[in-house]
Amino acid sequence: MSTIGGNYFNYSSPFFSNSSGGGMSSVLGDYMSLRNGSYKKLLRSYYAKQNKESDSSKKTGNNNTADKTVSKELKQIKTDSSALKTAADTLTNKNSKLFEKVTKTVKDENGNETTTKDYDWDAITSAVKSFTSAYNSTLDSAANQDNVFVLRKAAMMTKSTQVNKNLLNRVGITIGKDNKLTVDEEKLKKADMNDLKSLFSGSYGSYAANIGQRAADIEKVTEQMIKNAAKSNASTYTRNGSYSSLATGGIYDSFF
């Protein structure tokens, strides 16, 4: 079990199954999630919040309060997920020299120069810290969302992080009770390079690549939601539980 913004998630549920494979298994997973109430609870929470904001708007005479709030939250999650994708790409880029040794010239107190070949640990540390910072910010902004797709992808991120917990700890990265990542710079700079490469190097299969893909998914859908909101000035969800920005299909509609 894990939490995002105080909400508990069961990773064994089909609600958090990896949908990248597509096909009937994904449809059945979504169907079972609807049957066991996962989506319904989130949507009820969403509408309770929207109704409260709507009542408040009527009292103040401002009918756009809810739209402005949603727009601000959507823009924040888009910004944070975009930054996380960029940070992940910096680490996993196959053309990057980040995890290759470089020639360094060091002068001692007498001005004598010594040439050595080593990894640029300062650059590696900076890149990893940028990644963890963007990761933490994305979890924060995801916690403010009521969109099921965003919550699901954020939960997948925390699951992937938990799966790599031991390896992350070996390179100086720990996971807090709030799922946030903390970097021990001293331990990171002494870490085994093979462990670092396993986590952060390579655009396919690595931990950073996995997180980057989830971030890209969130960025893409929130960007579309913002565009749709700008065009229609309408809520992201319809009252029947379908999504105006996602081609989810009619299977969802009949349950709400």
Image (cartoon, rainbow, N blue to C red):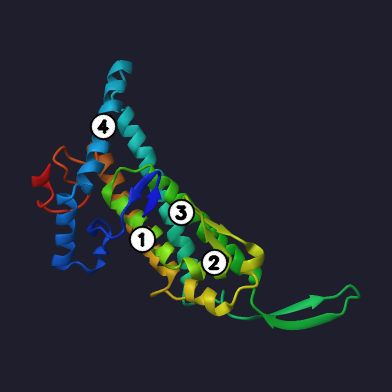
Q: Quadrant of residue 29?
A: bottom left
Which type of secondary structure does the marked residue at label 2 adopt?
Answer: helix
Give the residue pinned by disc 1: 214
Residue 96 visible somewhere in the drawing:
no
Q: Nearer the viewer, mark 2 or mark 1?
A: 2
Residue farthest to the right, as pictured: 110
Q: CA distance from mark 4 to mark 3?
A: 27 Å
Determine which residue is flagged by label 2: 169
Please give left or right for residue 231 compared with residue 77 in the image. Answer: left
Residue 164 pos. (x, y %): 45, 68
Q: Nearer the viewer, residue 204 or 48?
A: 48
Horizontal side, residue 191 vs residue 151: left or right = right
Say whether marks 3 and 2 touch (CB < 8 Å).
no
Residue occupying the point 59% across, 77% down: 192
Residue that numbered label 4 is attached to:
48
Q: Position of residue 150 (x, y in %)?
A: 32, 51
Q: Disc 3 designates what residue?
A: 179
Which one is in front in this view, the residue at disc 4 or the one at disc 1? 4
Q: Mark 3 or mark 1, which is nearer the start of the sequence?
A: 3
Q: CA distance from mark 2 to mark 1?
A: 22 Å
> Considering only vertical position in the picture, is 188 above or below 176?
below
Identify the mark nearer the N-term, 2 or 4. Answer: 4
Q: Nearer the viewer, residue 168 or 211?
A: 168
Residue located 9% across and 51% down the image: 250
- Comparing labels 4 and 3, the label whose residue is closer to the camera: 3
Judging from the image, what secondary structure is the residue with disc 3 in? loop
Quadrant the N terminus occupies:
bottom left
- Asked if the residue at tag 3 contacts the one at tag 1, i.e. Cβ–Cβ closer than 8 Å, the answer is no
Rendered location of residue 60, percent (x, y): 33, 17
Residue at the location (33% across, 56% down)? 153
